[in-house]
Amino acid sequence: MSLTFDEKGLALTETIESVTMPVDCSFEKVNDWIHGIDVQYEELEALCLGMATENDKLRKALELAKEMFICNDMALPHTFEVIDDALKT
């Protein structure tokens, strides 16, 4: 794995197995990366699939949190533990 940094020392992209992607899925980082001159179709495809996977994990965590929130009479500490566990899977 290798990282690309900006002039402030912040990581912009990471390269794993010859595929370069933004280090996070924030709009700013993704937008900057997509408009780069050397972005290939396969990298865009990998980014989309990776973001879809993250969205699925977040959706699953939200569903579990809502269930726990309702079932445990709004017991917030348990809800946060469930979210953390769901994000690890």
Image (spheres, rainbow, N blue to C red):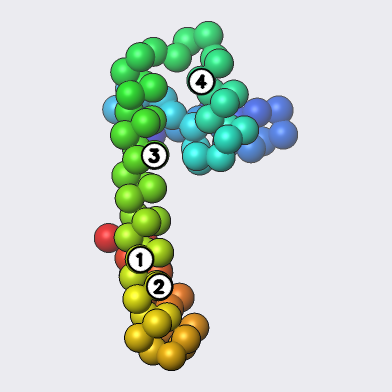
Residue 89 pos. (x, y %): 27, 60
Secondary structure of residue under mark 3: helix
Q: Residue at x 32, y 28 (%)?
A: 46
Q: Residues within 10 Å of mark 4 (few under 14, many from 20)?
A: some
Alpha-carbon distance for marks 1 and 4? 31 Å
Q: CA distance from mark 4 to mark 2?
A: 34 Å
Check disc 2 and report the residue beneath it. Answer: 66
Q: Residue furthest front?
A: 70
User: What residue lies at 39% left-to-right and 56% top-to-bottom?
Assistant: 58
Q: Nearer the viewer, residue 36 or 69?
A: 69
| Label drawn at residue 83 | none
CB under 8 Å between callouts 3 and 4? Answer: no
Left or right for 27, reference 82: right
Residue linked to disc 3: 51
From this view, report whether residue 46 is shown above or below residue 62: above
**Residue 62 figure quarter:** bottom left
Amino acid type at mark 2? Lys
Dot 1, how many residues are within 10 Å of its Cα: few (below 14), some (14-19), or many (20+)?
A: some
Q: Which residue is mark 4?
A: 34
User: Dot 2 lies on which element?
Assistant: helix
Q: Quadrant of residue 40?
A: top left
